[in-house]
Image (cartoon, coloured by chain):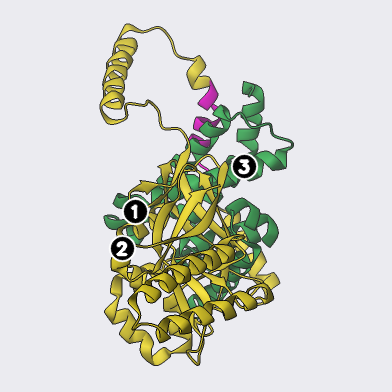
Chain colours: A yellow, B green
Amino acid sequence: MNNKDFEKRYLDTFNKVHASDELMNKVKNLNEEKKNLRFDFRVVSSIAACLVVAVLSLILINPFGSRENSFVLKAGATEIGSDSPVAIANVHPSLTSGGSGVDGLTIPFSVFCDGDNIVSVKYTIENAVFIFPFEDYEIVMNEWAEDWRTTYPKAAELSDKDYDKVLAEIKVDNGFLDAPQYSSYTLDYEEQKLLEQYDDMQSFPIQLSADISTEGYTFKWVEYFDLVSDLSEIHEDEELFNEMLSVYLEETQKLYNDMFDKVRVIIEVTYEDGTTESEIFKISCIRANEEEGHVMGAQIVNE
Amino acid sequence: MEHAEFKKIAEKLTDVVYRTALSYCNSKSDAEDAVQNAFYKLLKADTEFESDEHIRRWLIKVVINECKMMWRSYWYKNVISFEELGNEPEYTDNEYKELFDEVMKLSPKYRTVLHLYYYEGYSCDEIAEILRITATAVQTRLMRARNKLKEQLEEA
């Protein structure tokens, strides 16, 4: 059956689907139902009783009254506002194939939207990409895919949701083999909330990845690796080592912040009434505490 | 919105909105609930509609959201089986019944793009705008829906 035949058969089939007369009348009279209300003590007293119950329920369940369209972005239980950045996860530099350098930064993208009347949430990224590590292993390393899925069944399950991914136009050299890279994904509200319950950052199914292999950063990376090699050569001199470590951490933080400087995450929610609302968020880098081995942490703030 | 104007829109678009709802819900009673909710929202809407087509798209968008809200509730996902939700129109011709049954076996996201493309005649870009997904996603869903349907019809 060709496309034209299929189209005709489809049209003929669904032409036979009609709203019932009862539904048609109900819809047509939706407006009239309100006009036709007559003063009737029984009706009024029933409505009054219902209203009392409803108001009491609202007061008890929702002290702020009716639920209006709203959303906030959260990392764990913390709302991400515009006052101060909120930590989301550690930054993972990815090694080049020879192990001689770093060619990208990756963050488990562990944020989600919370709010009222939301149907779906679209996450868009500028000047970086989203990757789905499980997809990477599915495509590139088939023989390992099953192991990964067995080790992290929950992450694999979350990875299999319908993300409506959009491939990125510009590729990022991030060391994640040949994983597809995306500029946006859209999830149903409830499905994206499932991510809230998944806190294993090592296997988090969505990652944000930024590129360092652009011309502007080349020089900075030469300086960075000079610092790293200096650090490894002076470990016997504790005082000098600590001084260099401090410089190294400061430089690393500066470099990472430079790389994240243009990265923006745009969150667009669609509400039940068809309207949308969006907010823009900025990523930056902070030093995590010493106990965590001087790693860098990523944080996010509403711009 | 004036009552006369609303009545005119209801007469013209209830079928359109109902078919869209049925293609998502696969249940007559749920589709009817979604349709009434969508028209009720139209009554309440502050939106300034530029044309009849604007109202038509707005209603399609809202009724799909209404269906999604129903579909994602715990009760629908966990208690009612897919077969139990079926409630199809009466067909005398077996060819139509077969296609209807097979379309309804597809997942809601595939049924919706099929319906908007083949029945409502919207382009991929227009469907993308209605469903707030990309045109590429619409094309992918259309292609997968057609392939799945083809397989199902061959097996049937």
Front one among B45 and A241: A241
Are tags 1 and 2 found on a single chain?
yes
Residue A223 appears left or right of A301: right
Question: Gap between marks 2 and 3, in whole Å?
Answer: 38 Å
User: What distance separates the C-alpha of mark 3 from that of mark 1?
Assistant: 35 Å
- Relative to B1, is B60 above or below? below
Residues rendered magenta in the picture: A19-31
Q: Amino acid at mark 2?
A: Asp
> Mark 3 sits on what residue?
B58
**Residue B23 x, y percent position in the rendering:** 51, 55
A274 is within the stretch colored magenta: no
Which quarter shows the N terminus of chain B? top right
**Quarter of the figure with residue A292:** bottom left
Q: Look at 63% across and 57% down and name the residue there.
A: B128
**Is the residue under label 2 in contact with that under label 1 (CB below 8 Å)?**
yes
Residue at (53%, 39%) from the top-left corner? A273
- What is the chain letter for disc 1? A
- Give the prevailing secondary structure in the magenta stretch: helix
Residue A153 point in image, percent of width and height: 29, 74
Residue B156 locus on image (x, y percent): 46, 77
Q: Would you name the residue on which mark 1 appears?
A: A76
Q: Is residue A170 left or right of residue A74?
A: right
Q: Which mark is residue A199?
A: 2
In this view, B70 is above or below A151: above
**Magenta span contains residue A20:** yes
